[in-house]
């Protein structure tokens, strides 16, 4: 009889544990779904690099992913917004690449905003921009420089942010396509290892 009671107790404990786990999974799935509904194409962004490089206002409100004047543009492409657990807290984060430039030239700057969920809203964790990419690239290739982030060059893989950039050479003919990988496990983006590079093919 004691064995029977022990088996019943164990079965009940397992059932409670499984039920709790299932409930947590459901809550997380709902939170992730709600976070992915946040509209990154219609919101206000703070920008530094774009403001410094092109005279764009330091706070920009995009409509359908776009803000532009006769002099410059600032855009967010919905197809390039990525999701994944970037900072290791098991919650879904968003990686939002932004491109900006002046219509007077062909130089393009990129700001990659990393958001996490906070009280049902998107909270900015950090930004990776051309300046940070170039500083980290120069740590391994001191005479090198970043030309621009490659089209659709931002990826989320295994909890890290992988960024393909054209480097060295010229804007019209960059010499390399380099990949810089960043971790967000600390409070700021940290490059992981030496960038891998290969001929750009351009």
Image (tube, grey):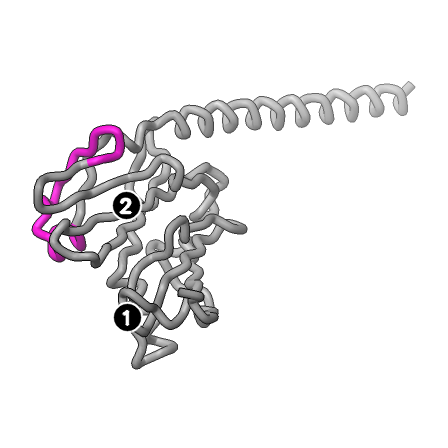
Using a 10 Å C-alpha cutoff, classify the residue at mark 1 as few (fewer than 14 neighbours), some (14 to 19) or many (20 or more).
Answer: few
**Residue 111 coordinates in the image, percent (x, y):** 27, 51
- Find residue 23 and report its image quarter: top right
Q: Which residue is mark 2?
A: 98
Residue 63 magenta-drawn? yes
Q: Report the mark closest to the observer, 2 or 1.
A: 1
Q: State the residue at coordinates (47%, 53%).
A: 160
The one nearer the camera, 95 or 197, is: 197
Q: Which residue is mark 1?
A: 170
**Residue 2 coordinates in the image, percent (x, y):** 88, 22
**Residue 104 coordinates in the image, percent (x, y):** 11, 53
Q: State the residue at coordinates (21%, 48%).
A: 100
Q: Secondary structure at mark 2?
A: strand
Q: State the residue at coordinates (31%, 34%).
A: 122
Which labelled disc corresponds to residue 200?
Answer: none
Quadrant (top left, top right, bottom left, bottom right) of the N terminus: top right
Q: Above or below — where is 135 with respect to 8?
A: below
**Left or right of 159: which side holds 167?**
left
Q: Kindly indicate whether the residue at mark 1 contacts the one at mark 2 (C-beta within 8 angstroms).
A: no
- Find residue 121 and report its image quarter: top left
The one nearer the camera, 112 or 30, is: 112
The residues tagged by marks 2 and 1 sit, at their Cα atoms, a distance apart of: 22 Å
Extent of the magenta region: 48-66
Residue 45 magenta-drawn? no
């Amino acid at each position: 009889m004691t064995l029977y009671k022990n088996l019943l107790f164990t079965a009940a404990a397992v059932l409670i544990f499984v039920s709790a786990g299932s409930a947590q999974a459901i809550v997380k799935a709902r939170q992730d779904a709600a976070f992915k509904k946040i509209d990154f194409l219609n919101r206000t962004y703070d920008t530094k690099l774009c403001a410094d490089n092109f005279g764009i206002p330091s706070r920009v409100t995009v409509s359908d992913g776009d803000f532009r004047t006769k002099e410059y543009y600032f855009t967010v492409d919905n197809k390039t917004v990525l999701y994944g657990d970037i900072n290791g807290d098991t919650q879904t984060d968003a990686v939002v690449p932004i491109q900006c430039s002046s219509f007077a030239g062909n130089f393009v700057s990129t700001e990659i905003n990393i958001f996490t969920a906070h009280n049902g809203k998107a909270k900015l964790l950090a930004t990776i921009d051309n300046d940070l990419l170039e500083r980290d690239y120069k740590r391994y290739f001191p005479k090198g420089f970043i030309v621009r982030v490659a089209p659709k060059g931002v990826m989320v893989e295994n909890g890290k942010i992988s960024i393909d950039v054209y480097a060295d050479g010229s804007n019209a003919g960059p010499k390399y396509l380099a990949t810089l990988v960043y971790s967000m496990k600390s409070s700021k983006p940290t490059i992981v290892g030496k960038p891998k590079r290969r001929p750009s093919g351009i």
